[in-house]
Image (spheres, rainbow, N blue to C red):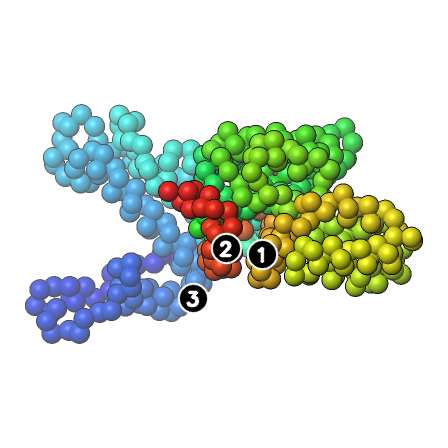
Amino acid sequence: MTITTDAVDTAAVSGDETAKRPRTKTTPGGVDPALVSQLVTQAREQGLQLSGEGGLLQQLTKIVLESALDGEITDHLGYDKHDTAGANSGNSRNGSRSKTVLTDVGPVQIDVPRDRAGSFEPAIVRKRQRRLSGVEDLVLSLSAKGLTTGEISAHLAEVYGAQVSRQTISTITDKVMDGMAEWQNRPLDPVYPVVFLDAINVKIRDGKVANRPIYVALAVTADGTRDILGLWAGDGGEGAKFWLQICTELKNRGVDDVLMAVCDGLTGLPEAIGQVWPRTVVQTCVVHLLRNSFRYAARQHWDAIAKALKPVYTAPTEAAATERFLEFAEAWGGRYPAIVKLWENAWAEFVPFLAFDAEIRRIICSTNAIESVNARIRRAVRARGHFPHEQAALKCVYLAVMSLDPTGQGRKRWATRWKSALNAFDITFDGRLSAGRK
């Protein structure tokens, strides 16, 4: 079924009639709503569906693409179709060739004009291009949510009626690796008030399926926004030696100073951070400290231990926290000495947050800021099960990270949440943060 626009009244744009007719309201893009409404009405009268194969949207997409291509070849040749100016010009139109491109509304067959010299290079639908960018964005979005290539192929076939092979989908997603390499090596800010360091485990099939860590560094910028500094795939357990390499890389990319680093209490990590940034205050995540404490206790004592430890990490001062901890050690040290030793070993990295007020404590005493990122990553990773190799795992994690805040609202919430904390950081750290804003 063919959509025609002959019935559309164009008198409204003529000189005499413009003054007599009321002005037609147009959309911000300059599209006449009356024309659109008439096309939709005409399609309904002819029994043409809006979407689906052969629907109005597909036919309009075909018309728009072919019109744009006709405009491109006219610009390329320098004269309109059938214009005598093209005689003996040295190049002319040479018919067209059909090709099917995958668009947001499904597969659309279009006629691409050709020239005799073969020098015409269309821009809107390039030579050998079979997908418009919107389709690639859709594939990347679905991949970021953890769908496999087979699931994406089935989804495109079911919803859009498009047959896209798993290899094609893999080729589309592989393109992000070039962007990831550039992103991973981009220059960074000279100063960050807080950097959160953590790692998540993914299953990689390298001979046999085994857990491998993916290291994540998330920073709060001097303006209060979130910035994921990078992703790294480790080759074994989460180790301080690998974190030292990461911190050194971050410094080489421009990070001269970090006011506070929040981590999970990994042995040797504070020393690794101090070796790269000697003035950085290392804060052990209280949540991780509590979880590690429960590992040494029987399940029936978890609630009692949590209740006994709460006065320690909610104490108003370091001195008060010390008193509460001594009370805890007296009550539980005989039964669980390993818990007492755990807290004693982590005490120097546990107490820094106690120097701030309650509002600031809540956002620097744990790695919750990065845990929300990790939750999104785990969701995508869990849907995939395991990965054939390290690059496939990094690609999935990178896509998940890049789709974290599509609306930009999260960025605004972060800036609001960190405003008071950054003011306190300016005072506490003697202007080091202000120096990073210059």
Point out residue 253 in the picture as x, y percentages from the top left corner: 49, 32
Crowding at dot 2, Cα within 10 Å, few <14 / some 14-19 / many 20+, comes out as: some
Return the residue at label 1.
356
Assess whether mark 2 and mark 3 are in contact (beta carbons under 8 angstroms): no
Return the residue at label 2.
424
What residue is shown at x 30% (from left), y 27% (from top)? 118
Q: Which mark is residue 428?
A: none
Question: Which element is circle 2 on?
Answer: helix
Q: Mark 3 against mark 1, which lies toward the viewer?
A: 1
* Residue 264, placed above or below residue 317: above
* Image quadrant in which the N terminus is located: bottom left
Q: Which mark is residue 47?
A: 3
Question: Which element is circle 1 on?
Answer: loop
N-terminal label among 3 and 1:
3
Q: Mark 3 against mark 2, which lies toward the viewer?
A: 2
Left or right: 160 in relation to 353: left
Instruction: Note whether residue 107 is visible.
Output: no
* Image quadrant in which the C terminus is located: top left
Q: Amino acid at mark 1?
A: Phe
Q: Amino acid at mark 3?
A: Gly
What residue is shown at x 57% (from left), y 35% (from top)? 278
Task: Name the foreground residue: 264 vs 321.
Answer: 321
Q: CA distance from mark 3 to mark 1?
A: 68 Å
Asked where in the image residue 50 lies, by quadrant, the reply is bottom left
